[in-house]
Image (cartoon, grey):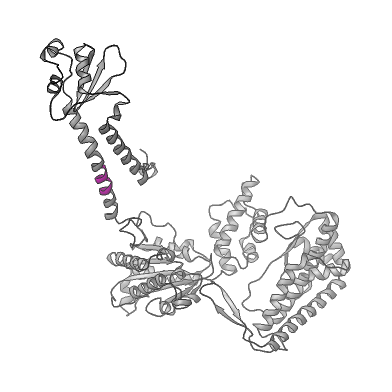
Amino acid sequence: MEDQNNQPSRPQIPIWGWILFILAIVLVVQLYSSGQIFGNQEEFNAAEVAELLKNDRVEKMTVNGNRVLIEVKGQEEAVIWEKDAQSNIYEQLEYYGVDGSVWQDFPNLITPDGSRWDFLINMLFTLGPILLIIWIFSRGFRQIQGGGGNSIFGFGRSRAKNINDGDRPTVTFDDVAGVEEAKEEVQEIVQFLREPERFIQVGARIPKGVLMVGPPGTGKTLLARAIAGEAGVPFYHISGSEFVEMFVGVGASRVRDLFNKAKENAPAIVFVDEIDAVGRQRGAGLGGGHDEREQTLNQILTEMDGFDKDTNVIVIAATNRADVLDPALLRPGRFDRKVIVDLPDIKGREAILKVHGRGKPIAKDVDMADWARLTAGFAGADLENLVNESAIFAARRRGTTVTNTDIQEAFDRIVIGPERKSRVMDEEQKELVAYHEAGHAVAHFYLPNADPVQKVTIIPRGRAGGYVMTLPSDRAVETKAWFEDRIAIALAGRASEEVFFGQVTSGASSDLQQATQTARMMVTRLGMSDELGLPVYGEEQGSPFLGRSISSRDYSENAAARIDAEVKEILERNYARVKGLISDNRERIIKLVEKLIEVETLDRPTFEAFMNAA
């Protein structure tokens, strides 16, 4: 038996189709009443019909109400006679000399009167459209009474989806990795719902609201799905943007309807994803802000902590920008608990890679710890994408397992871009790129605060002609010496071009931008300038409308000139330092370039062995 869920739904006739159908019926009625339904027959009057009868030219007469269809002998086309409705056919024709003898000679001339059928047809054409309109309206009202969110009277109803036992996600807390602290925080919600006496007996009150904050892709929605999968209570989920409409008051009505549904099924959980769409700070814009959004926010504030204290509804929300939320939304009594879902550390990344590697044929020589170290700065969604892309590369080469090569290809594609196989460099360009990347690699190898080199290649990818991939380590804080070495490494490619070719190219544009940003941050934000000292120059403020931080200039023109001079001095000092390093290792770089031109790519063991032996 076919599953009912897989059966194709019946096609829905649009409203304009019903309108055309009704208009067609009305047109048929009009044609029938005007006589045009029979075609283009010639119309006769009573005198002409009487003349035909007297001359014995009538073959047959069919009476249909007041209309008489006359078939004439020797004539293919019939004629029509509209008789007077006040008298019958005999009386009218008798006036023109057709007496009873004519009818006696032709007893079968006239067919039985069709007035009864004519009455039924008229009733059908008259009542049919009315009954059809009644049926359409009754169907519409049934939909309205069903509470559909798209119906007219359901416009102000909540569109939140209630996850019941049949639709409950299969995700559990075992499927969530890399955010152990955040997971422990939200697990208490499920524990309270399952064992409320454990908390009540010590006078504890479960938080009314839990706000999950973190960068995109760190697992906020995944945590909510795990809560829905583990909690044995109704779970309503909705996006913040679904509250706001163009009509003022609709969002507030939907909030009321959502909380009323949750209260009726309490204890219950309400999950609002991307709450910053409706919870932005009030009064932050010109003209008083957006009335609809602010009324919706006011209703959320009232429902979460108003006069009604016995709701037993827990609200969980997720956002990437807690700094733009209204302060009233963040106070205790509404969102009592703020859970930070941050980027995972190296152990968290390893756990996430193992979770997403379940069920995939990973080769035995793949060490997830090495890839966890390489993927510093990756969020959970990035790691999932890495594993999936690796499986795609394995399938593309028709392999049976996912190898380190597949993961490396996927990593390069995600971080840098796809390999540009169509780009063919001549020998001169290849040599230039090789010296540029060799300068970066040698700086990484010799500078004390640099990360170890994972890969050196001159194969073009994305917008890069070549690149040096490092193996970063997780650092909680960075020193001034680390920033100085970072600037020197960024400038090493340009320094290598100048040392070996006596000229520079445009290939170092992104390196210069990165070095300048680092030097300016050292001067203005981190107090690492001996000339300008400890003050922070330029206050960063979050904009609830731009969705990102903007820096306001709060220092004088003299300070700005000193900042520019200090940034330039840091760049020039580190450029001279790394230029001297490259000059001291000139012969080693030449050999490294020759090796790169020969094999195009060096991995970490090959590179380190070559540098130690050279």
Question: Residue 113 location in percent, x, y?
Answer: 16, 23
Residue 84 on image: x %, y % = 17, 28
**Residues shaded magenta:** 132-138
Q: Nearer the viewer, residue 487 or 49?
A: 49
Q: What residue is shown at x 71% (from left), y 79% (from top)? A: 519
60 or 284, which lies in front?
A: 60
Quadrant into which the C terminus falls = bottom right
Inspect this view and state whether residue 442 appears. no
Q: How many marks?
A: 0
| Front position in the image: 345 or 110 | 110
* Corner quadrant of residue 575: bottom right
Indicate the quadrant containing the N terminus: top left, top right, bottom left or bottom right: top left
Where is residue 37, by image quadrant?
top left
Q: Position of residue 67 (x, y in %)?
A: 21, 26
150 up-or-down from 304: above or below: above
Helix, strand or loop for the magenta stretch, by majority: helix
